[in-house]
Image (spheres, helix red, strand yellow):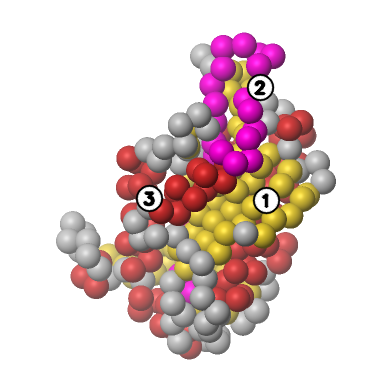
Amino acid sequence: MKSETVRTVGNIYYSSKLKDGQGQRIANDFLTRLANGFARRTAKYIRATGEVPFVFRERQLHSIIAPTLDDFTDAFLMELPTKRSWSLTADERNSDSHGWIDYWCSYRNISFLVELKHGFISGKTGQLRKYVKEEWETAILQLDAIEDEAKLQGQCSKGALRIAVHVLPLFESCSQVGKKPDQDLKKLLEIQQRAMEELERKPNWSAMWKIHEGIVGPYEYSNAIEFYPGVLLVANVSEITI
């Protein structure tokens, strides 16, 4: 496992099971830069506003993800129109239809097709909720259904990679403002490993951002006081399509 310290942002711990195949090194680099930029921009937002952008839902995450991609990719587009060929997948509930891919990116002459999901993990239990697992499976199936789009994008570059990315903030609710959660690194890494094992299709890349102690909280809401000891990003990178 690799790690890096980002001043005033925190520490990021990377776990990669990507094989040393075509495009996989570039995919690892892409995701590492995405996680690093996500942490930096999120910390900047927190310090400017006093609130956390990942407390909302997937739509609000785009305000962090999009400028991060713009920082290091050659080009990117949100909501790329595509045809979803559900008949090619294991999902029998849907018929072939038109849809949109969250992000298309060009990076180091590889086309990336990215589906983004958002959820939460309890920092106390570390358990993955049912809806988190369902959202992950949805992202995987959405990418399975765009094989034709991946082939098309692969012809315009050195290949195309489909990536599901799930952003999972860890939260802890407290009754007292002055009580901070224990940011135990061993516990955070155990949560990271558990997610890698429990999700289906298995993620082959993840990053745990241990948030800087100055911005973990407390954040007061109408009915709760919450702290955020970390944010887990898990990803599944497909085989390259040429």
Extreme-right residue of the structure: 7
Magenta residues, start to end: 161-187
The amino acid on which the numbered mark 3 sits, given as a three-letter code, is Glu
What kind of element bears circle 3?
helix
**Within 10 Å of the Cα at label 3, are there few (<14), some (14-19), or many (20+) other Cα atoms?**
few
Sequence-wise first label, 1 or 3: 1
Query: Label 1, label 3: how many angstroms apart (C-alpha)?
Result: 21 Å
Q: Which mark, residue 180? A: 2
Query: Label 2, label 1: how many angstroms apart (C-alpha)?
Result: 20 Å
Q: Which mark, residue 12? A: 1
Residue 173 in sight:
yes
Viewer-side residue, 199 vs 147:
199
What kind of element bears circle 1?
strand
Query: Label 2, label 3: how many angstroms apart (C-alpha)?
Result: 28 Å
In the rendered view, does 79 fall on the left or right side of 71? left
Question: Which residue: 51% across, 14% down?
Answer: 223
Q: Which residue is denoted by mark 3 in the rendering?
A: 198
Sequence-wise first label, 2 or 3: 2
Q: Is residue 53 above or below residue 157?
A: above
Dividing the image into 4 quarters, which one contains the N terminus? bottom right
Q: Is residue 192 above or below residue 30?
A: above
Dividing the image into 4 quarters, which one contains the C terminus? bottom left
Question: Which residue: 45% across, 49% down?
Answer: 195
